[in-house]
Amino acid sequence: MTLKTTFLGAAAALALTSGAALADPAIIFDLGGKFDKSFNESSYNGAERWKAETGGSYRDVELQSDAQREQALRRFAENGFNPIIMAGFSFATALETVAADFPDTKFAIIDMVVDAPNVRSVVFNEHEGSYVVGVAAAYAAEGDTVSFVGGMDIPLISKFACGYAQGFKSVKPEGNVIVNMTGTTPAAWNDPVKGGELTRAQKAAGSEVVFAAAGGTGLGVLQTAADEGMLSIGVDSNQNYLQPGHVLTSMVKRVDNAVYDAFMQGEDLETGIFVMGLANDGVGAAIDEYNEALITPEMKAAMDDATAKIVSGEVVVHDYMSDETCPAY
Amino acid sequence: MDYLTIIQILDSALRLATPLLLTCLAGLFSERAGVVDIGLEGKLLAAAFLAGAAAAVTGSIWIGLLAGIAGSLAFSMLHGLASITFKGDQLISGVALNFLAAGLTVVIGQSWFQLGGRTPSLSGNGRFEGWDLPFADAMAKIPVIGPAYDELISGHTTLTYLALLAVPLSWWVLYRSRFGLRLRAVGENPSAVDTAGISVVKLRYAALVIAGVLCGLAGTYLASLAAGFVKDMSAGRGYIALAALIFAKWRPWYALWATLLFGLLEAIGNRYQSIALGDFVIPVQFMQALPYILTVIILAGFVGKAIPPRASGQSYVKER
């Protein structure tokens, strides 16, 4: 951590001398790390896409502990980076204080709403995307049981589970969705062995398709599902390639688009709440060469139908986080 | 709950208990020789990483196993160097190893594979296959014993059987061999051992070598089971093993039962995330906390006094 601070200091000194007036954008990755094959990596990809297309440069930092949030944020703001993007809901408290101190700097936070005039809050309708993969799971399963493995037991993850259950039950109303959470501490994001055991237990209880929204734990779920001859569903990034032929689809969250858009607008970042849902390709089910064979025509038709109905407002997917209850289980 | 479900839960318990048992025995050897080993978690992580990395590169889990043992041994020796040779504080050295492992595995993994500290997925010979014991298929048709034999006893990986074998072996080494007698003595009263003309330092290093090998097996088991390394994948198992060790009063057979109990509780927690008792539903958080709650309760009242080896935690200094 001392090393990190040194680097941060060095970066700060460099930025001061090399002309902070240029106002490069900056991004702060959350604890999962830049290459987590999931959420943070997706935001990294968005930033890299911006860099490749515009030739601009940006600054980034990977957090090592919760205590660094405000420090990193303040450091970037002091050094004139604009806009500053935060990948992760955990930044909310730190941002509330820092945003007020730097009214001329624009901030963007992903997965959380922070009410300040210079903040863009990007939220995703994960429940909508999860609904669509739930429909896919219902068509893929011969019986009437599918399951879900979540990481840490927080409302955001229940939002995935609830959307998935609603999608599944829209096709098989009498079906059963087993919902398991790995744990209640951050260690639950990185326990593939336990993820695997949960998957085995779900398989024993009759589940045929398992949806993993659990970070590194999810890799163990996908692996065990492949070992046990089940189908799995990945999350955040497109994870279809991880177990080709065994991953039914992935519920992708286009965090990269959110970061790319924010970087593109630069200092003139529009603030306010931005909702990324099925309608504006913010979430969706990934289909590529690794899972084509698993997606049957009628499954595809049902998924497209569900998507169209949600976009048109004909089907309203209940958001678990609105009242912390789920009608589907 | 039918019979088959019970068998499946026991089967899962055995899988979950294997790394705990190996790690617990590692701690047992080390602490019996008077070296407190809070660095078990770090060794487990280092072994899992190197095993995952070597198996991913070579495609053979056996080479992965050797690499895992080598990594864990290196950490063990570092612990020995700091706490035996240089007589540093054993707790601090162990904690430092845990931090070192958590950081190093990710940094090295990132520079080797560019996967964010993850290793590529292992497949085929890169993992341990389950062993089908003789007649497992034929026996499966026999009621009652059949499924138990087929599901519970057969079909585990080499390391699970090895871990179970390590229990009587550890018992024999500790209580029936000359080496074991000296090892135990060095944890109780090192000066007596020294007076008898036996090297305290050598014995303690020997104990750490055994601990390193056992942790290496446990780490490799994790990497093989999860088909690769993910950062922080040991997820506190080193600490649970340490709790199991106290629970087991530093005895090999008790260590087996203690770790099996922890495995069983975790398996039940995985299987039944919430149990309904009439109108009252036991919440999932309680089920997940159960192993820890139980540790406190059992330690406080049921096992009686758990007395650590007397010289545990103290570096040996000859009188001048």
Image (cartoon, coloured by chain):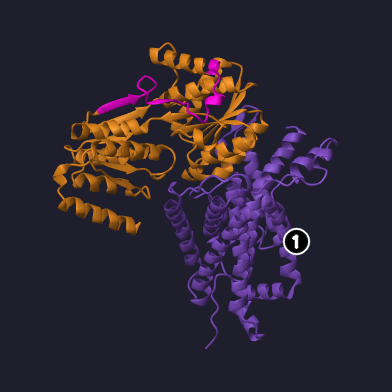
Chain colours: A orange, B purple
Residue at image position (52%, 88%) is B320
Q: Position of residue B120 (x, y in %)?
A: 51, 46
The quadrant holding residue A34 is top left
Asked if residue B262 can be seen in this view, the reply is: no
Residue at image position (33%, 36%) is A46
Query: Chain letter of disc 1?
Result: B
- Which residue in the rendered view is the most extreme toward the top? A314
Quadrant that contains the N terminus of chain B: top right
Q: Considering only vertical position in the picture, is B212 above or below A155?
A: below
Give the extent of the magenta segment: A272-299
Residue A286 counted in the magenta span? yes
- Which residue in the rendered view is the most extreme toward the right? B142
Q: Position of residue B296 (x, y in %)?
A: 59, 52
B241 left or right, relative to A272: right
Residue at image position (80%, 39%) is B137
The quadrant holding residue B162 is bottom right
Q: Position of residue A85 (x, y in %)?
A: 28, 38
Amino acid type, callout 1: Pro
Q: Position of residue A49 (x, y in %)?
A: 31, 36
Q: Which residue carries the number 1 mark? A: B168
Mark 1 secondary-structure assignment:
helix
